[in-house]
Image (cartoon, rainbow, N blue to C red):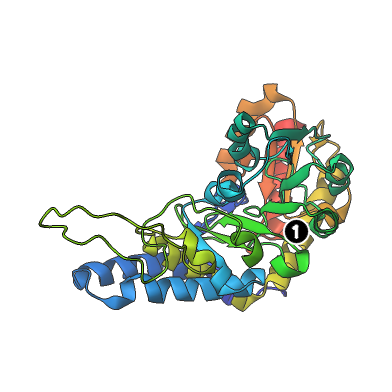
Amino acid sequence: MMELIDRNYLEEFAYFGDRIYMDCSAMGMQPERTRRAAGEYLLRFSDSLGRDPQVFGSEICGRGKRALARLVGGEPEDIFFTMNTTWGNNLLAKGLPLEAGSQVLVSGGDFPSVYMPWTARQKEGVELVVLPGKNGVVAAEDMIAAMTERTRVACVSLAQSSSGYVTDIRKLARACKDRGILLSVDAVQAVGRLPVHVREMEIDVLSASSYKGLLGAMGAAFCWCRPEVMEQITPLYLGGNIEQGYELPLGRFDGEKVRLGIPSYAHRAARMETGTMNLMGIHTMTESIEMLLEIGIEKIAGQIREVETYFRERMKEAELPIRFLGSDDPDTWGGSVSFLYDLSRRPRLEQALSEAGIYVTVRDYLRVSFHYYNTKEQAERLVFVLKQALG
């Protein structure tokens, strides 16, 4: 079963023990090497009293951006670090100049951080067009059909949080490009589990946190932005992200009156980074990304697809009183399976999962999300528990 993934990489999660973790869409767990790296970083920082240059920005950020560029197919100079996916989703909403009457397309079934940043722009006369979903799906075709001559931006998740549906980004991006529309993509449920290539997909802005499929820690994320789009955006914050040579105020100690000139922004994505960053989070994120690159994203996606397909087949054979969200088309599967169930069974369901040591998302829907370490045997065990709890 595990021929796609070398056993050494499975041992990275030996600390799971007998527990079965199928919930990386909510929270990605860190491989052993990343857990070690976090502790080593903190020790190195404190032992040197913060003087070790290896614990500061240039080395850590440069390594992280190079790893991310390999992962998503962009250039390191077009990547900047953020705190979370939401920050990147705000990039266009807060910094892109738009005229009154401009339209922005969003999916009503998407995660709130995809569409919420745009709600404030409605005060400026920007029209927020919310497309209704069906069974948790707003397809690329739906967004394309809604485009008009006033549409300026389309915002969508590559892989949808609640339904697991994977958008045909290439089709959507081609339509956007033909019409001069910018495409902003939330990829937090996709990166690390699915192949993503920002250039080939013709994405304009892509944002993702590290603590889900990238198997990093909370508080560290990244955003990639096409250079020609970046030139149109006003940075949200200013501090150290201005061009070198900006004339700093004189007489800080003697009280002379000074005037600050208007700064020029730093080159490419560097204009978006200012202030102290979460270097420990970036360091640990990079450890996990480099491991995923070692394994190979294609292998990871293949392993996930094999387990997901098996789980879906076994669930259909079980004939439980549930309704799958998303689509039956395998091309729209991305490693997360969600379904509606009889909510009166929820206490029984949660107890059964707890007793079995199985971790999934249980809300008004149930979501199972796989990563490379999950197996058919684990999927079979989950099906057995679900039959007992929901049958």
Eyeballing the image, is 59 above or below 226?
below
Residue 329: percent from left, percent from top:
89, 51
At mark 1, the secondary structure is: helix
| Left or right: 210 as drawn, with respect to 53 | right
In the image, residue 67 sits, relative to residue 156, either above or below, namely below
- The image position of residue 264, as x and y in percent, is 45, 63
Amino acid residing under circle 1 = Val
Instruction: Examine the image and state in which quarter residue 133 appears.
Output: top right
* Residue pictured at 41% horizontal, 63% vertical: 242
Instruction: Compare residues 346 and 128 and report the one nearer the observer.
Output: 128
Q: Residue 5 lies in what quarter of the image?
A: bottom right
State the quadrant of the N terminus: bottom right
| Rendered residue at 52%/71% (across/down) | 65
Residue at image mark 1: 307
The percent coordinates of residue 351 (x first, y second) are 58, 33
Q: Is 78 on the left-hand or right-hand side of 35? A: right
Residue depicted at x 79% and y 51%: 167
* Frontmost residue, 257 versus 65: 257
Tell me: residue 20, above or below residue 50: above
Crowding at dot 1, Cα within 10 Å, few <14 / some 14-19 / many 20+, comes out as: many
Q: Residue at x 73, y 65 (%)?
A: 301
Does residue 373 appear to the left or right of 170 in the view shown?
left
- The total of numbered circles placed on residues is 1
Farthest residue toward the left?
A: 254
- Residue 309's quadrant in the figure? bottom right
